[in-house]
């Protein structure tokens, strides 16, 4: 780009590399944080952090780099929220679970009973996923919802690939046990 200032060129490159991944970033934040509104704010904060440190980006995978920043931003917000929570009384309305469907899920059926059944299943799955410890929930979401490779997840989390595989297996086993107990039969995810 001839005649572009270094700042304009930096912004263009940032937008080109990172804006296509805003849905993945929002999805991850939504699952790592308890409230959907908080997730959008955290994604904005993560993008701001990414922009500030964009000159240090050396990798070939901007999506994984961005998701690592989103993850760290969420955990920082989590820690701050826990500190505030010790000071604030519990409020049922504030801690009510969002009733959004699994990201990427479609409501192709037009039968109201089928839609209700599907929504009930999704809400159950959401509740179960939210009960997973953070280290299992984030790996499950990065693999299943974001379809990242084990290697990409290992890079985001800073753990060995074997750890990713074992945590993913434990998360899936947990969900399978809980779903089997709920439905009263064997369930295969």
Image (cartoon, rainbow, N blue to C red):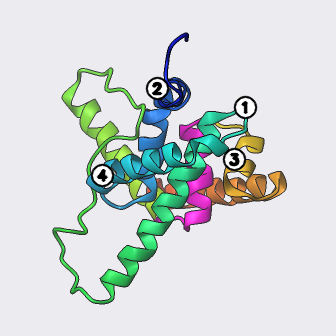
The C terminus is located in which quarter? top right
Disc 1 packing (10 Å; few <14; some 14–19; many ≥20): few
Q: Residue at x 28, y 60 (%)?
A: 97
Which SS class for mark 4? helix
Circle 1 sits on which residue? 60
Residue 50: in magenta span: no
The CA span between labels 4 and 2 is 32 Å
Q: Is residue 85 left or right of residue 184?
A: left
Which SS class for mark 2? helix
Contact (Cβ within 8 Å) of mark 4 with mark 2: no
The CA span between labels 1 and 3 is 14 Å
**Which mark sits nearer the N-terminus, 1 or 3?**
1
The CA span between labels 2 and 3 is 32 Å
Q: Which residues are magenta?
A: 131-146
Residue 136: in magenta span: yes
**Which mark sits nearer the N-terminus, 3 or 4?**
4
Q: Which mark is residue 114?
A: none
Q: Residue at x 55, y 65 (%)?
A: 134
Residue 10 location (% of width, % of height): 53, 30
Circle 3 sits on which residue? 153
Residue 113 location (% of width, % of height): 23, 33
**Which mark sits nearer the N-terminus, 2 or 3?**
2
Circle 2 sits on which residue? 8
Circle 4 sits on which residue? 36
Which SS class for mark 1? loop
Q: Is residue 118 left or right of residue 160?
A: left
**Which mark sits nearer the N-terminus, 4 or 2?**
2
Residue 22 falls in image quadrant = top left
Which SS class for mark 3? helix
Mainly helix, strand or loop, the magenta region?
A: helix
Q: Nearer the viewer, residue 133 or 24?
A: 24
- Camera-near label (4 vs 1) is 1
């Amino acid at each position: 780009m001839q005649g572009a200032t270094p700042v304009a060129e930096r912004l263009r490159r940032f937008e080109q590399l990172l804006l296509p991944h805003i849905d993945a970033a929002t999805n991850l934040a939504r699952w790592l944080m308890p409230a959907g509104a908080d997730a959008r704010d955290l994604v904005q904060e993560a993008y701001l952090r990414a922009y500030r440190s964009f000159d240090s980006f050396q990798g070939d995978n901007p999506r994984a780099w961005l998701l690592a920043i989103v993850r760290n931003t969420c955990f920082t917000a989590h820690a701050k929220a826990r500190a505030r929570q010790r000071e604030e009384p519990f409020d049922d309305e504030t801690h009510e679970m969002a009733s959004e469907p699994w990201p990427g899920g479609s409501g192709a059926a037009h039968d109201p009973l089928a839609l209700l059944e599907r929504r009930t299943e999704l809400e159950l799955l959401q509740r179960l996923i939210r009960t997973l410890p953070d280290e299992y929930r984030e790996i499950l979401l990065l693999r299943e919802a974001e379809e990242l490779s084990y290697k990409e997840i290992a890079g985001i989390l800073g753990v060995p690939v074997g750890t990713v595989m074992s945590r993913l297996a434990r998360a899936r086993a947990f969900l399978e046990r809980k779903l089997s107990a709920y439905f009263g039969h064997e369930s295969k995810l």
